[in-house]
Amino acid sequence: MSVWHVNLQLRLEKQPDADVLDALTDALADLDVGVGVDPRHLLSIGITVEARSLRAATEKGERAITAAVTGLDLDGSVVGLETLDWAEFERRGEEPVVPPLASLQDLANILGESKQHTQNLVDNYPEQLPAVAETAAGRIWLVASAERFKSFPRPGRGRPAKTFDQRARELVEVATSWAEGKEMQATRTDRAGGIDLVLDRVITVRVVLRAGDVEGRIEIGSGGRVRQYREEDVPTPRELRAVLERCLKPETRSTLRGKVKAQDR
């Protein structure tokens, strides 16, 4: 004979009274019963039985729980029945109640991606990387979801990640093309350790490449307002275009150019 743990779950129509739960506990006291109910009216009843096989243990446990529930004010339907051998039951009992959690940066570290690219992944694959909570500091994911996602097939996998220098130079080209599409004059200056791109003498895109211990960054600004991106959150081309568009909103381009000309006098 082996020892088994049988757990039956009932979805109730209403929260049970404390007296009913006490009566249920008394009826199954000889079987080391454990009873719990959550706010969604899900009643969980776990007992210990001895049986020669998994099937025999399941049938014995279900009969015992059904007999105890009969006659009590517990209207509902069975939604789950699980039987575990004692070794597995104890192993699960030793597992942490809260599974390992991960922030966006933790997620990026697990996946071996940049923080910005990881943000794109969670936006594009919400079913594979579902957030389990949202806090003041941001969303939270399960580490297990990230580990599973590492083997999930997706376009572009297997190609080496671009370096910061490559991504930064690519964004300079994107900004130049954006300016040409708006008939703006683009002036680019390649200097030691970086690139300066000025669009119509109004919008600046400055790239500071990695030099020694100094990490790379990108600065985008106009009219005295500068937005800075560190290496770990380099914007995508689409995000860059959106930022450039916003650079024109506070004041029209002609007004800004008028200020520049006034400063030159």
Image (cartoon, grey):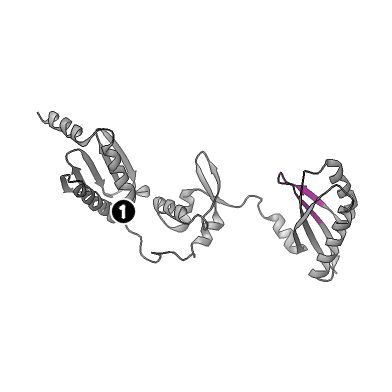
The C terminus, quarter of image: top left
Q: Residue at x 52, y 60 (%)?
A: 147
Q: Which residue is mark 1?
A: 164
Position in image of residue 206 (x %, y %): 24, 44
Position in image of residue 74 (x %, y %): 83, 49
Residue 69 covered by magenta stretch:
no
| Residue neighbourhood size for the residue with mark 1, other residues' Cα within 10 Å, grouped as few (<14), some (14–19), many (≥20) | some
Would residue 118 appear left or right of 33 to someone viewing this image? left
Would residue 151 appear left or right of 218 to someone viewing this image? right
The N terminus, quarter of image: bottom right
Q: Residue at x 36, y 65 (%)?
A: 159
Q: Residue at x 78, y 55 (%)?
A: 77
Please name the amino acid that badge 1 sits on: Phe
| Number of numbered labels in the structure image | 1
User: Nearest the camera: 84 or 8?
Assistant: 8
Position in image of residue 153 (x %, y %): 46, 66
User: Nearest the camera: 110 or 6?
Assistant: 6
Would residue 57 appear left or right of 148 to someone viewing this image? right
Position in image of residue 155 (x %, y %): 40, 64
Name the outermost residue toward the left. Answer: 265
Q: Residue at x 47, y 49 (%)?
A: 104
Asked if residue 88 shows in the view, the reply is yes
Asked if residue 215 shows in the view, the reply is no
Would residue 49 appear left or right of 253 to someone viewing this image? right
Q: Does 227 sit above or below residue 6? A: above
Q: Which residues are magenta?
A: 34-46
Q: Secondary structure at mark 1?
A: helix
Q: Main secondary structure of the magenta part?
A: strand
